[in-house]
Amino acid sequence: MKLYLRYFSIHVRSLMEYKASFFMTVAGQILMSFTGYFTIWFMMARYRVVQGFDFSEVSLCYAVVLMAFSLTECFFRGFDTFPSVLANGEFDRIMVRPRGLIFQVLAQRVELTRIGRLIQALFVFAWAVPASDIVWTWNRVLTLLLMIGGGVAVFSGLFIIYASLCFFTVEGLEFMNIFTDGGREFGRYPYSIYGDGVLRLLTFVIPLALFQYYPLLYLTGRAESVYYMLTPLIGCLFLIPCLLFWRFGVRHFKSTGS
């Protein structure tokens, strides 16, 4: 952790060399995110509810997904840019250093400009939490924290899969954006609105619904079982096959020779 914090401080100092650029980029991220949120506002102003979920509940759902994705982009961006690491021979140097491979990939890229989306998610939280009819007992507060933590785990697992596929391809496979950026965009609403087939896919294959839809049912009182509260922890298990796939890819890595 101490070494990671040193890497982190290096990234911060590097960004602060161009303060105006950093703050303008953050502001741009906030404005772009709010335009997406306005589409929800306009639709909910017209239809009032979506499958029984009102605007405050949809906003809460949206904020959870956006916060989880933003945190993942901030600290797991190294896996998203991994194709260039392989192509330029940097991974060869990473492998001979006396530190874990995952740690080095994580530490080499911290995308702090993504905090713009995180700030926007906090604004939505600040409105949605008191506006909803949810009685915020300790177990519901814990559920909300588990949703965010589980979302970070699932999205980071998808980034790891994306990086691992690069060991077997020339370039990164952009279809993974269906589950990363697509998961964020579709996560503006409860995943159940897209149909039973999509919900099963996002439950048993790509477990996005485990940190978004099912605990949301518990938060809003639509489900009383404590298992709905704990589904984000089940979603965290998704990291296990992702890390195993990463190790499989590393074993099949062939040096660029550079």
Image (cartoon, helix red, strand yellow):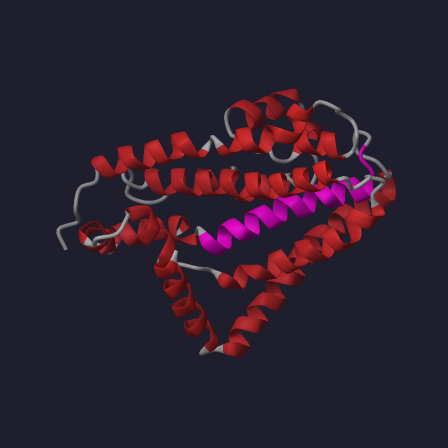
Q: Residue at x 47, y 30 (%)?
A: 237
Magenta stretch contains residue 59: yes
Outermost residue, left side:
257
Magenta-drawn stretch contains 18? no
Which quadrant would the N terminus be assigned to in this image?
Answer: bottom left
* Residue 49 locus on image (x, y percent): 84, 36
Tell whether 207 sits left or right of 217.
left
* Magenta-colored span: 53-75
Mark count: 0
Q: Position of residue 205 (x, y in %)?
A: 50, 25
What residue lies at 47% left-to-right and 31% top-to-bottom?
238
Residue 2: where, in percent of width, then height? 37, 60
| Residue drawn at (68%, 56%) of the image | 122
| Residue 204 screen position, x and y as percent | 53, 23
Looking at the image, residue 38 lies above or below residue 48: below
Left or right of residue 208: residue 106: left
Q: Quadrant of the C terminus?
A: bottom left
Q: Is residue 12 visible?
A: yes
Viewer-closest of 35 and 12: 12
Q: Residue at the spot x=82%, y=49% of the render? A: 130
